[in-house]
């Protein structure tokens, strides 16, 4: 968009840095927009423990398995030559919640481990909000910019809403602190994926709307004649807040309405609660495929987020989407209160992964299963979606399973379920064709269940080393091809595909 | 003892020619200050402007249009626009389920469109009720449409929504809307009435303070 380019030209001139960084080079950004990468930040809210996910430790591997978080050998699925495992579990309850469940993460890893990389990590905070923020800023490693902002800045100059946050109220959703990040690259928060699209047109779908050309006149008169005549606008005309409001009323609004996003992003289907056709609207043509992958969009906020995330990427609305399970308790549709909880009816235990305080093994298993299901669905949808320049959208997408921290590694001797605290030691899972697949960077000591680091250059495991947040942050930016010129970030080639 | 009545202070008389001198001095100052004839123009150096939350804006809107908050706008006939559908978009909070315990510091990209939707819906409701009678706001143009009657409605709109008398240039702007749309629609009275109402209720003066 021309206005964005002009802004960037001014910014680069002001910064006096020439055009060394492609983030300040309008031509480079326009080129990036034609050859984008897509970032999906899938937040494992509450502390997704990597040794309860793809780095499960078998009982037979450990010197003291009874007091550590190890799994019975017979539930751990392995693959020849792969560093990854999956613990397929069945239990009678999720802690105090009398809901039996079965999980089969092995099915997802069977399909997608060839594009899975795990990097071990040692964080710097066991406070949820702070650790969440550090997971997307690399502990403020690049002038306080977030991963999502940087991807939006690099690749989103030509799309209407580059950086969308579908999860809310967590540190994963923080804005960065660098005022030079363009306003259009900053986060846009979507509170309710099911009805947010209704805010993407000024009049369409209203019972007593105005014809489009009348609305056009109304806006023109308001902004060009009425407001300039008011004392308020004369006095506060140079307010940055009003300037931003005027910007949003301009090109972004025109583009969003012209693209018909009120319908293209309508995840929900026609229902008595959402009588779309009565108001001249209809569900997105691509929503059926999204709902097939995420069947609980009407009742499960994570499914609704995932379906909308796909539509945002598919329709060229965004290049970065952030989603994840929240801390709320949700259960399957059709389950009525007081009737008991049938098997697999709990979709999200209270507190997400943080339910591990009460029931580590069951809580981790249920929420990891949830994370894997979203990964599976998104990969399937994006693989089926051709990209205009060739290949599929998945070929240029990176799913970063972000989390705050790991969990304490010990358990009461022989306990089948137990409570855990927060632990700095952990790792992150990344699904993408842009990273080395079926690859573990670092390792796990089975005698402590603690992870250890790796050589950032070669990727060789190094038990004497731990991985810093800034290294993972930089490695992900490298995999996504985001310019890190003058960032001061360490180079971590081991986290990108050669 | 009765308090002495307050009087405007007056400068000491300068002699018989003083009034003429004062007028001349004032005229000179006016010439020096460009634009003085149109009244003093002041711009803020601080520009401390805040957005009204959707809830506050909608309450003012309801008061101005004589509608209850729940009568303003419902998306798909079921979701209250301000309380539910566009609550966060319009600067509201939702701490219980979404963890949003403070208004978003930056306006949402869809906030101007959401504001338009609420205003169109509310103004449309007011027009429908006025048409059914008794009229509260749009009566003059519903009885007989004319430039003078549109000006009456415009004055009432500005007074009710912005709480002050309309300026001539503002009335001209709202009349210009009629000229702009009259040939585009079958029902110019409704389109103008609702459109003028939207202009005023979604002006920056109505949305910010």
Image (tube, coloured by chain):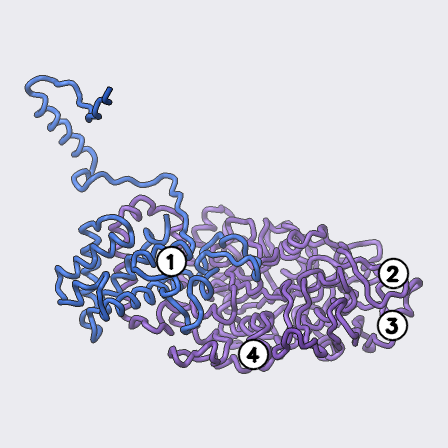
Chain colours: A purple, B blue
From the viewer's perspective, is residue B190 above or below residue A272? above
Which dot marks residue B58? Answer: 1
How far from the left and from the top, in percent, is residue A93?
Answer: 77, 72
Residue at which label 2 appears: A412
Residue at point 37%, 47% (across, down) = B209
The chain that hosts pointer 4 is A
Residue at which label 3 appears: A72
Same chain, labels 1 and 4: no
Most foreground residue, A14 or A145: A145
Callout in the foreground (4, 3): 3
Residue at which label 4 appears: A290
The chain that hosts pointer 2 is A
- Work out whether residue B63 can be spotted: yes
- Tell me the element at label 2: loop
Callout in the foreground (1, 4): 1
Please indicate whether residue A122 sits to the left or right of residue B16 in the image.
Answer: right
Which dot marks residue A270? Answer: none
Q: Residue furthest left?
A: B16
Residue at point 46%, 61% (across, down) = B87
How far from the left and from the top, in percent, is residue A375?
Answer: 65, 73
- Tell me the element at label 4: helix
Earlier sequence position, callout 2 versus callout 4: 4
From the viewer's perspective, is residue B77 above or below residue A455? below
Residue at point 35%, 54% (across, down) = B60
- Mark 4 burial class by Cα count in 10 Å: few <14, some 14-19, many 20+: many
Callout in the foreground (2, 4): 2
- Work out whether residue A379 can be spotted: no
- Mark 1 burial class by Cα count in 10 Å: few <14, some 14-19, many 20+: many
């Amino acid at each position: 968009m021309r206005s964005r380019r002009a802004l960037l030209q001014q910014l680069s001139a002001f910064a006096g840095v020439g055009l060394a960084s492609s983030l300040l080079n309008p031509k480079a950004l326009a080129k990036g927009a034609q050859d984008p990468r897509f970032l999906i930040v899938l937040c494992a809210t509450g502390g997704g423990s990597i040794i309860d996910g793809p780095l499960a430790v078998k009982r037979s591997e450990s010197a003291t398995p009874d007091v550590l978080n190890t799994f019975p050998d017979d539930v751990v699925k392995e693959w020849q030559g792969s560093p990854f495992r999956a613990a397929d579990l069945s239990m009678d309850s999720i802690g105090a919640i009398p809901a039996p469940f079965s999980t089969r993460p092995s099915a997802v890893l069977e399909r997608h481990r060839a594009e899975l990389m795990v990097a071990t990590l040692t964080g710097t905070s066991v406070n949820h909000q702070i650790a969440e923020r550090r997971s997307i800023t690399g502990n403020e490693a690049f002038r306080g910019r977030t991963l999502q902002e940087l991807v939006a800045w690099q690749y989103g100059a030509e799309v209407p809403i580059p950086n969308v946050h579908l999860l809310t109220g967590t540190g994963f959703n923080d804005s960065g602190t660098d005022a030079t990040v363009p306003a259009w690259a900053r986060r846009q928060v979507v509170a309710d994926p099911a009805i947010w699209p209704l805010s993407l047109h000024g009049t369409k779908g209203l019972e007593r709307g105005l014809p489009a050309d009348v609305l056009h006149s109304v806006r023109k008169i308001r902004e060009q004649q009425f407001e300039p005549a008011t004392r308020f606008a004369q006095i506060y005309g140079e307010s940055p807040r009003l300037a931003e409001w005027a910007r949003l009323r301009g090109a972004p609004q025109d583009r969003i309405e012209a693209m018909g996003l009120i319908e293209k992003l309508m995840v929900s289907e026609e229902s008595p609660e959402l009588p779309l056709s009565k108001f001249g609207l209809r569900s997105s043509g691509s929503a059926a495929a999204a709902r097939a992958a995420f069947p609980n969009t009407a009742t499960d906020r994570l499914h609704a987020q995932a379906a909308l995330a796909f539509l945002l990427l598919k329709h060229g609305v965004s290049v970065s989407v952030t989603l994840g399970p929240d801390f709320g308790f949700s259960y399957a549709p059709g389950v009525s209160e007081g009737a008991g909880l049938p098997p697999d009816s709990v979709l999200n235990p209270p507190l997400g992964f943080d339910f591990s305080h009460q029931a580590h093994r069951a809580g981790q298993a249920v929420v990891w299963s949830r994370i894997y299901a979203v990964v599976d669905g998104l990969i399937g949808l994006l693989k089926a979606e051709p990209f205009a320049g060739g290949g599929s959208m998945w070929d240029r997408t990176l799913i970063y399973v972000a989390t705050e921290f790991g969990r304490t590694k010990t358990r009461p001797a022989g306990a089948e379920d137990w409570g855990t605290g927060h632990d700095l030691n952990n790792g992150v899972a990344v699904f993408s064709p842009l990273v080395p697949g079926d690859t573990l960077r670092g390792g796990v000591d089975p005698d402590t269940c603690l992870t250890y680091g790796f050589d950032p250059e070669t990727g060789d495991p190094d038990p004497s080393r731990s991985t810093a947040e800034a290294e993972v942050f930089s490695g992900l930016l490298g995999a996504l091809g985001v310019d890190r010129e003058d960032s001061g970030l360490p180079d971590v080639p081991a986290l990108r595909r050669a | 003892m009765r308090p002495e009545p307050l009087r405007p202070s007056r400068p000491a008389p300068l002699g018989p020619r003083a009034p003429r001198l004062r007028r001349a001095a004032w005229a000179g100052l006016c010439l020096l200050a460009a634009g003085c004839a149109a009244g003093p123009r002041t711009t803020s150096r601080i520009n401390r402007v805040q957005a009204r939350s959707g809830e506050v804006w909608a309450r003012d809107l309801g008061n101005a249009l004589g509608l209850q908050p729940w009568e303003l706008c419902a998306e798909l006939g079921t979701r209250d626009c301000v309380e539910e559908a566009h609550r966060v978009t319009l600067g509201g909070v939702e701490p219980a389920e979404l963890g949003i315990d403070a208004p978003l510091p930056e306006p949402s990209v869809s906030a101007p469109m959401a504001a338009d939707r609420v205003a169109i819906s509310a103004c449309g409701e007011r027009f429908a009720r006025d048409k059914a009678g008794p009229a509260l706001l749009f009566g003059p143009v519903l009885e007989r449409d004319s430039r003078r009657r549109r000006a009456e409605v415009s004055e009432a709109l500005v007074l009710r929504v912005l709480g002050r008398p309309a300026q001539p240039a503002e009335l001209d702007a709202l009349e210009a809307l009629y000229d702009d749309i009259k040939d585009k629609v079958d029902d110019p009275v409704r389109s103008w009435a609702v459109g003028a109402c939207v202009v005023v209720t979604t002006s920056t003066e109505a949305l910010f303070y």
